[in-house]
Image (cartoon, rainbow, N blue to C red):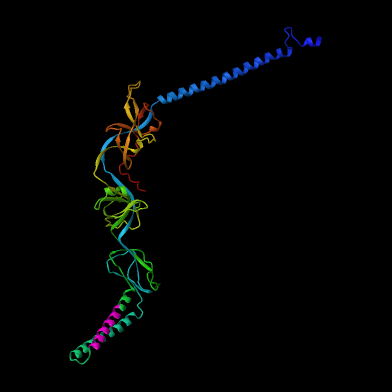
């Protein structure tokens, strides 16, 4: 009984439980202090971040600007086309044989009818003389029989046979002459020759390409435009073509013809323009970028495309407004976000249909870090491209 009493306090509670209360209280106090310190530190860090962001937001942002201008705007249709000769052909002999004569050099300009190549005739001319002799004999026989027929010495049937024999002989002469011509290659039109593809003594089968001949002035450019553009195109309309071979050079031409049907697969229509090419710098097969002025020129408010912030909910710009002066008395600027309605584009520019007036100063670069009412500093040392007809730099 004495041992049991030693484990009971005067108030009747176990001695071991009372000994545990003090450590528990100390532990809870330590945990509370640690948690409080952590939460306080996080609150301090958050406060400093908010102060830093607030200070950064109030700091003026450096941007470049441009003044909205009212300029003449010419609507254009742009397409990619391919150059082709107004007349072009790969020349070849119509008969087989061995190359006997070559009368041209690669790259020559030749007139129409110029002899270019001749195959070995073999016995073709001997056969031609034989047939010509037979035709002459048939002609003499017919003449004698006509005289005898007038004297009623021969019948009409004999005379008809003589006429038929003469026609047959002359036809054989023409056929032999045609066979000889098939072994000769001549220029069918004036133009520039390409690279020679055959050599003397080479055996050619009928149809083997000897050389290409291209008429280069004028030269044609074929391109395709959407069917919606048909109403703005007509023959005689001016076009401008550029090629990568000659950067910065513009070749002027006119629309020569418009196809009479629309391609049902692409819903595009083929257009052909003619370009003067007196210096023969343009050659068939080149790609060309074609621009067609469509409609009359109008006045439009224009901005560089870099000034537009494109968003799914609407396109916006930032207008520069004069703000309060700073401590030194220097005028400050703020920005105002404005929704705009855009029109067509040309080069680096875009037409503004509403939202901006002529003379408004608009942020042209640096708007990604702006918000409505933000302070800005204007620095136009480096300005974005604002060319209506940009061209790549010469390499």
Quarter of image, res 381 = top left
In the image, 304 versus 199, the foreground residue is 304
Q: Residue at x 73, y 14 (%)?
A: 16
Looking at the image, how many numbered discs can be counted on the residues? 0
In the image, 327 versus 188, the foreground residue is 188
113 relative to 247, above or below: below
Question: In x, y percent, where is residue 51?
Answer: 46, 22
**Looking at the figure, which quarter contains the N terminus?**
top right
Quarter of image, res 171 = bottom left
- Give the side of residue 18 with respect to residue 292, left or right: right
Residues drawn in magenta: 156-174
User: Can I make out residue 213 in this image?
Assistant: no
Q: Specify whether residue 97 is painted magenta.
A: no
User: Can I make out residue 27 in this image?
Assistant: yes
The residue positioned farthest toward the right in the image shown: 1
Question: In x, y percent, where is residue 113?
Answer: 27, 69
Query: Which SS does the magenta portion mostly show?
Result: helix
Q: Residue at x 57, y 18 (%)?
A: 36
In the image, 237 versus 389, the foreground residue is 237
Question: In x, y percent, where is residue 103?
Answer: 32, 70
The residue positioned farthest toward the bottom in the image shown: 153
Quarter of image, res 105 = bottom left
Q: Residue at x 24, y 41 (%)?
A: 298
- Give the side of residue 369 with respect to residue 217, left or right: right
394 relative to 102, above or below: above
């Amino acid at each position: 009984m004495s041992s049991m009493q030693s484990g009971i306090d005067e108030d009747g509670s176990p001695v071991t439980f009372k000994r545990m209360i003090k450590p528990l209280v100390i532990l809870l106090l330590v945990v509370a202090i640690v948690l409080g310190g952590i939460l306080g530190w996080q609150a301090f860090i958050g406060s400093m971040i908010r102060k830093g962001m607030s200070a950064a937001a109030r700091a003026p942002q450096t941007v470049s600007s441009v003044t909205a201008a009212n300029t003449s705007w010419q609507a254009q249709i742009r397409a990619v086309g391919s150059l082709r000769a107004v007349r072009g052909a790969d020349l070849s002999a119509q008969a087989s044989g061995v190359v006997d004569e070559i009368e041209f050099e690669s790259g020559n300009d030749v007139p129409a009818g110029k002899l270019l190549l001749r195959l070995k005739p073999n016995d073709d001319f001997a056969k031609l003389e034989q047939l010509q002799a037979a035709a002459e004999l048939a002609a003499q026989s017919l003449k004698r029989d006509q005289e005898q027929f007038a004297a009623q010495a021969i019948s009409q049937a004999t005379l008809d046979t003589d006429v038929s024999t003469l026609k047959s002989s002359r036809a054989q002469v023409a056929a032999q002459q045609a066979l000889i011509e098939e072994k000769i290659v001549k220029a069918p039109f004036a133009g520039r020759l390409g690279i020679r593809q055959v050599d003397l003594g080479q055996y050619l089968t009928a149809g083997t390409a000897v050389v290409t001949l291209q008429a280069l002035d004028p030269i044609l450019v074929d391109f395709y435009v959407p069917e919606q553009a048909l109403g703005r195109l007509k023959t005689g309309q001016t076009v401008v073509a550029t090629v990568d071979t000659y950067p910065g050079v513009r070749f002027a031409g006119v629309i020569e013809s418009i196809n009479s049907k629309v391609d049902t697969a692409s819903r595009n229509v083929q257009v052909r323009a003619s370009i003067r090419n007196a210096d023969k710098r343009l050659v068939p097969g080149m790609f060309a970028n074609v621009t067609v002025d469509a409609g009359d020129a109008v006045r439009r408010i224009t901005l560089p495309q870099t000034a537009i912030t494109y968003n799914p909910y609407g396109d916006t710009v930032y207008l520069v407004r004069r703000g309060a002066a700073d401590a030194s008395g220097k005028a400050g600027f703020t920005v105002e976000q404005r929704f705009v309605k855009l029109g067509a584009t040309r080069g680096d520019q875009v037409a503004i249909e509403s939202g901006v007036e002529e003379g408004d100063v608009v942020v042209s670069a640096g708007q990604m870090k702006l918000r409505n009412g933000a302070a800005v500093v204007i620095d136009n040392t480096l300005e974005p491209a604002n060319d209506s007809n940009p061209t790549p730099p010469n390499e």
